[in-house]
């Protein structure tokens, strides 16, 4: 299984929309005053009345007050600050000349990073939260900058598509549906979850080495494994920096590390990053019917281009042959759900739900009665079941794999909805272990 990458493709000529997210600025100031205690003046004649100055005991701040003050100061100003707090690969940068070369490239083209950060505004919060749930380095949220410049419509000569640039075969391995009307590789939520699953799989495969995992994400695990075997036979180091990898892969990891350095200290390099509020940009509205995006946009008062930018997987701009759900700006989700509920259609064919951040596991359901349909507002919780990934071997069957992991066959099919009865060697299955 191989993921061939190319330089980030330019945006389609027909798509020039740029998101301008609201910028929230917060300033915290404290004015501290101090008083000096007057000293006795020996020049005052004896017997003259003077005011007695009473020195009061100092008032000390309690530990709780100090803790609250510290927490207030440490609250991230925006999403970039939250990302910096979750960076975990900075110790791997150092003064490596390959990283320095890539850093100089980014600094010489500040418009590229600034444009990518603007493009990514609607999506980065979702990606950061998914990475945090899996306790993964938040530098990985910058991978789409390198892969696609955060353009969900990006398409490379190797037929890699979407934010994460999945080629067709790898997309199918990670259950990304691809047909004439819908391409899961362009689905913001589905492709992000698939990319995180793939990176997790690679991280485990290469014994917790993130640099090797990232190299394999770019070139394929087979390419990296063969390079390691070659060096091992020659008695050479098998770490990423010493492997004879393709030129693109030799630059790929340094690009990410250089980019993370710029995000860590943008002012030091003269980079301007648009502030991104640390809050969800979109929610998920499930619609169990086929609808044109233009009509959906009109129902909820959403700009049609914005709606398509959030739902690029629907290639015909209609909810056909896909998951029958839409990502909608947070402030429009309730309006859309209510509008859909009032459309006169049979009650057993329509259901509209609003789910924050498109997470499937929910709690605290609150139901409101509407015409022909229930609109359910759900609070989400992070998945609790550990997730494992299994590579299908020749001769494997779903029944055998279910027995091996001691799970029900129906559960295995549910976790992998795009699977067919005939498995393909090398296919990646998701398995939830209790």
Image (tube, grey):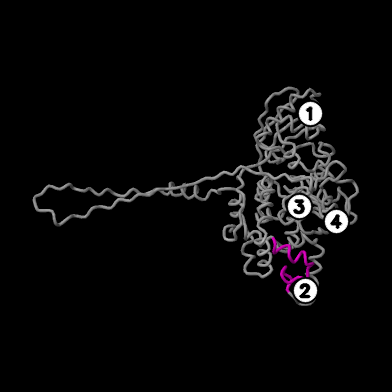
Which residue bears the numbered disc 2? 232
Separation of residues labelled 3 and 1 (CA atoms): 32 Å
User: Whole-percent x and y of residue 392?
Assistant: 85, 54
Q: Quadrant of residue 322?
A: top right
Say which of marks 3 and 1 sits in front. Answer: 3
**Residue 335: x %, y % from top left:** 68, 30
> Contact (CB < 8 A) between labels 2 and 1?
no
- CA distance for labels 2 and 3: 31 Å
Q: Is residue 314 magenta?
A: no
- Which residue is farthest left? 47
Tag in front: 2 or 1: 1
Query: x and y percent of residue 244 in the render?
Result: 78, 71
Q: What residue does disc 3 label?
A: 164
Give me the disc on residue 233.
none
**Mark 3 vs mark 1: which is more N-terminal?**
3
Disc 2/disc 1 C-alpha distance (Å): 59 Å
Q: What element carries label 4?
A: loop
Residue found 78% across the figure and 53% down from its top? 165
**Earlier along the polypeptide chain: callout 2 or callout 1?**
2
Circle 3 Cα neighbour tier, 10 Å, few/some/many (<14 / 14–19 / ≥20) = many
Q: What range is drawn magenta here? A: 237-255
The label nearer to you, 4 versus 3, is 3
Q: In which quarter of the image is residue 147?
A: bottom right
The CA span between labels 1 and 4 is 38 Å
Residue 216 can be seen, yes or no: yes
Q: Can you identify the residue that label 1 sits on?
A: 350
Q: Nearer the viewer, residue 390 or 158?
A: 158
Alpha carbons under labels 4 and 3: distance apart: 20 Å
* Observer able to see residue 388: no
Marked residue nearer the N-terminal end (4 or 3): 3
């Amino acid at each position: 299984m191989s993921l061939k990458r190319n330089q980030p493709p330019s945006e389609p000529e027909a798509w020039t929309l740029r998101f301008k997210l609201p910028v929230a600025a917060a300033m915290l100031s404290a004015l501290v005053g101090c008083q000096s205690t007057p000293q006795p003046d020996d020049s005052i004649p004896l017997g003259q009345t003077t005011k007695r100055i009473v020195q009061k005991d100092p008032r000390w701040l309690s530990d709780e007050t100090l803790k609250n003050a510290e927490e207030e100061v440490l609250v991230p100003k925006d999403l970039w600050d939250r990302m910096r707090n979750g960076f975990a690969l900075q110790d791997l940068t150092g003064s490596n000349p390959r990283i320095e070369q890539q850093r100089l490239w980014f600094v010489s083209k500040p418009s590229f990073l600034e444009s990518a950060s603007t493009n990514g505004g609607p999506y980065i919060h979702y990606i950061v939260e998914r990475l945090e749930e899996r306790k993964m380095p938040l530098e990985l949220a910058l991978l789409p900058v390198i892969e696609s410049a955060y353009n969900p419509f990006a398409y490379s000569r190797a037929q890699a598509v979407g934010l994460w640039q999945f080629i067709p075969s790898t997309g199918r391995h990670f259950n990304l549906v691809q047909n004439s009307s819908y391409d899961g590789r362009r689905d913001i939520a589905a492709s992000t979850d698939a990319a995180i699953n793939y990176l997790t799989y690679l991280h485990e495969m290469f014994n917790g080495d993130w640099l090797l995992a990232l190299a394999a994400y770019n070139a394929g695990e087979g390419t990296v494994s063969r390079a390691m075997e070659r060096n091992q036979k020659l008695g050479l180091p098998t770490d990423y920096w010493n492997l004879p990898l393709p030129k693109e892969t030799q630059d790929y990891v340094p690009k990410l590390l250089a980019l993370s350095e710029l995000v860590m200290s943008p002012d030091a390099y003269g980079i301007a990053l648009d502030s991104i509020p640390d809050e969800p940009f979109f929610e998920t509205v499930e619609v169990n019917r086929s609808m044109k995006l233009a009509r959906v946009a009109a129902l909820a008062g959403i700009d049609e281009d914005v709606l398509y930018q959030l739902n690029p997987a629907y290639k015909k701009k209609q909810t056909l042959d896909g998951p029958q759900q839409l990502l909608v700006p947070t402030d429009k989700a309730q309006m859309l759900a209510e509008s859909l509920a009032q459309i006169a259609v049979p009650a057993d064919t329509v259901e509209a739900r609003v789910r924050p951040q498109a997470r499937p596991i929910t709690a605290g359901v609150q139901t409101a009665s509407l015409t022909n349909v229930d609109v359910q507002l759900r609070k989400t919780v992070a998945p609790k079941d550990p997730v494992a990934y299994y590579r299908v071997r020749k001769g494997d069957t779903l029944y055998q794999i279910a027995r091996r992991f001691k799970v029900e066959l129906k559960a295995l099919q549910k976790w992998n909805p795009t699977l067919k009865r005939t498995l393909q060697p090398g296919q990646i299955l998701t398995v939830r272990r209790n």
